[in-house]
Amino acid sequence: MPALCVPQIKVFRTIWGAETQFSSDINILFNELHRLGFNGIEASLNDIHRISKNNDELFMEILTKNKLELIAICYTNWADFEPGSWEDISVDEHINNLDKQLEQVMKYNPIHINIHGGQDNWTIEQHEKFFQEALVLQAKYPNVSSSHETHRGRSLFNPSITLHLISRFPNLRLTADFSHWLVVCERLLDHPSDLERMRKIISRVDHIHARVGTVQHAQVTDSLIDAPKETQLMQNWWQMIWTEQIKQGKTITTLTPEYGPIPYAISNDVDVWKLTNREMERQRKNYQEWIYQNQDLKN
């Protein structure tokens, strides 16, 4: 049996809050992200238009100059979770929005697309209709991988529905932001029955949002101090994802330490810029240590 490839880890910086935390000047911001060691940014269409002042050529020029790649975010509704902008719209409207957004983000040459899809108040039949049609749209772009995020307010807002949908659709791939599920379920998901369910879900993950949360908050101030049990639980899940990705022959694994400002940050005293940078460094170290401790996975 040939040796398995160890994926290269690429860490991305969410643009969410970065402008107010460091600089709204795209030259200064992207240069600093490169200096810190990020491989790229994760950004929505609204993010891209805002930071580039609607100058696509400038955005691509500065992104390339700083050797940064892009994970693009598509929203089928409730873009960027703007307060007061949620609408109860049909599956067809979600699909039309996704079709337009996929076409629009392609001009920015993303290496991956993270989709915030659907809405949490649908019936199972509506969820199934959405993913059946969304996967057809995603297949129009075979050279760019895409995955749907496990997020509150979306179709994949809890593990039970997610398990049903991945069982129904073999090609459905996920962005794992499991911090949301702890809040939705209001428990740690550490029961033996949870572990079996998580194993199946984890086998479908393409991209990780590495943020530690608790049963009451989707984001903690300091994971190692405030939530050691949750930190270990989530690190175990992320390591399980890495194991599956090695088995699946992936050459790259992507991760975004997605820590955000108020109201995700519990207080204004939290320096989210430093927190995100520290988590980037911690996950790079964790990945290298995990690879070293699991040499047998490569053989």
Image (cartoon, grey):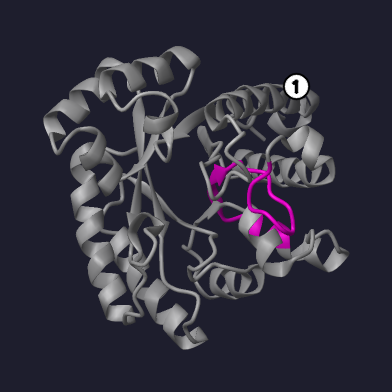
Magenta residues (range) = 198-220
Decide if residue 81 is on the left or right side of residue 236: left
Q: Quadrant of the N terminus?
A: top right
Q: Nearer the viewer, residue 241 or 50?
A: 50
Secondary structure under badge 1? helix
Figure check: 8 above or below 229: above
Report the residue at 62% width, 22% height from top. 281
Decide if residue 195 is on the left or right side of residue 123: right
Residue corresponding to mark 1: 292
Q: Amino acid at mark 1?
A: Tyr
Report the residue at 83% width, 59% height from top. 190
- Is residue 67 in view from this perspective? no
Relative image position of residue 187 (x, y in whole percent): 79, 63
In the image, farthest residue toward the right: 192
Report the residue at 25% width, 55% height from top. 102
Relative image position of residue 72 (x, y in whole percent): 34, 44
In the image, farthest residue toward the top: 35
Relative image position of residue 112 (x, y in whole percent): 38, 43
Decide if residue 284 is on the left or right side of residue 291: left
Q: Quadrant of residue 78?
A: bottom left
- Count of numbered badges drawn on the protein: 1
Figure check: 123 above or below 118: below
Figure check: 279 above or below 260: above
215 in the magenta segment:
yes
Q: Quadrant of residue 59?
A: top left
- Is residue 230 in view from this perspective? yes
